[in-house]
Image (cartoon, grey):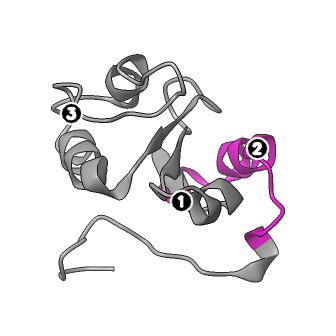
Amino acid sequence: MTGGPYPNATFVSDPQYAAVGIHALVQADADADDDDKLTYLFLADSTTMADDEHPLLAVDLYGQPGRTFRVPPRWNAEVCANMSIANMDFADFADFADESGTFRGLEGD
């Protein structure tokens, strides 16, 4: 996808991914051609849909494949922007997640 508000994002809505686990996603990325590999992805899973905050599940596919944290929509732009320009990496945000494994801003908002 080029242009638009999310030029570095690819959005997928496909029922075949409904029951896919983190391990399978990490393995699929490891098996992909170099041009098709991803650094991280954000999933809207059953927790996203059921939780009042609707936190996406962020999955590392590069530094520590399979490491995760959750990010509510309020902070998703902050995370994506900083990771896309390599200002911060996945581990920086995962390390700042609270005891529930959710990133809620760098100031603890």
Residue 91's disc is none
| x 35%, y 67%: residue | 9
Looking at the rendering, in which quadrant would you find the C terminus?
top left
Helix, strand or loop status at disc 3: loop
Residue 16 in the figure: left or right of residue 42: right
Q: Position of residue 63 (x, y in %)?
A: 49, 25
**Is residue 35 on the magenta stretch?**
yes
C-alpha span from label 1 to label 3:
36 Å
Image: 88 above or below 45: above
Looking at the rendering, in which quadrant would you find the N terminus?
bottom left
Residue 36's disc is 1
Q: Are marks 3 and 2 in contact (CB under 8 Å)?
A: no
**Is residue 52 on the magenta stretch?**
no
Mark earlier in primary sequence (2, 1) = 2
Give the extent of the magenta segment: 17-36
Q: Where is residue 105 in the image (x, y as percent from the top left)?
A: 24, 34
Kindly identify which residue carries mark 3: 109
Image: 92 above or below 61: above
Q: Are marks 1 and 3 in contact (CB under 8 Å)?
A: no
Residue 27 in the figure: left or right of residue 105: right
Q: What main secondary structure does the magenta stretch of the protein show?
A: helix
Q: Where is residue 25 in the image (x, y as percent from the top left)?
A: 71, 50
| x 18%, y 76%: residue | 5
Q: Nearer the viewer, residue 51 or 24?
A: 51
Q: Residue furthest right?
A: 19
Kindly identify which residue carries mark 2: 27
Image: 43 above or below 106: below
Between marks 3 and 2 in the image, the one whose residue lies nearer the viewer: 3
Residue 94 in the figure: left or right of residue 64: left
Question: Type of residue at label 1?
Answer: Asp
Mark earlier in primary sequence (1, 3) = 1
